Image (spheres, helix red, strand yellow):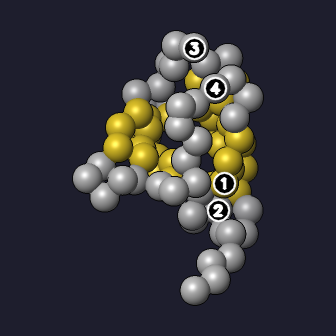
Amino acid sequence: MELKNRIWMTGALEWFAYIDDEEVFLGSKNFPSPLEEGDQWTSEVGDVFKVEDGEIKKIGHTEPPKRYW
């Protein structure tokens, strides 16, 4: 699958992408790699993303997942 978004990973293992010309945090440990059509995930800050037609799209926002230490 060819991805239409530009994505990159930082040295802190955090994933980012340009979505509609805006730099967006995609997640770190919960980021699905490699990406496939139909993948959906929620970032640590509660943003919900989905891969549709070869493009990462932000489809909503929810309460961030609870972290248990």
Q: Residues within 10 Å of mark 1 (few under 14, many from 20)?
A: many
Q: Is residue 21 left or right of residue 12?
A: right
Which amino acid, mark 2? Answer: Gly
Q: 29 and 64: which one is in front?
A: 29
Q: Residues within 10 Å of mark 2 (few under 14, many from 20)?
A: some
**Which residue is label 4 attached to?**
36
Q: Is residue 31 left or right of residue 14?
A: right
**Which residue is label 2 attached to?**
46
Do the residues under discs 1 and 2 have CB atoms within 8 angstroms? yes
Q: Residues within 10 Å of mark 4 (few under 14, many from 20)?
A: some
**Image point (66%, 54%), residue name:** 42
**Which residue is label 1 attached to?**
42
Question: Between marks 1 and 2, how big is the CA–CA gap?
Answer: 6 Å
Do the residues under discs 2 and 4 have CB atoms within 8 angstroms? no
Which amino acid, mark 3? Answer: Met
Q: 23 and 69: which one is in front?
A: 69
Q: In front: mark 1 or mark 3? A: 3
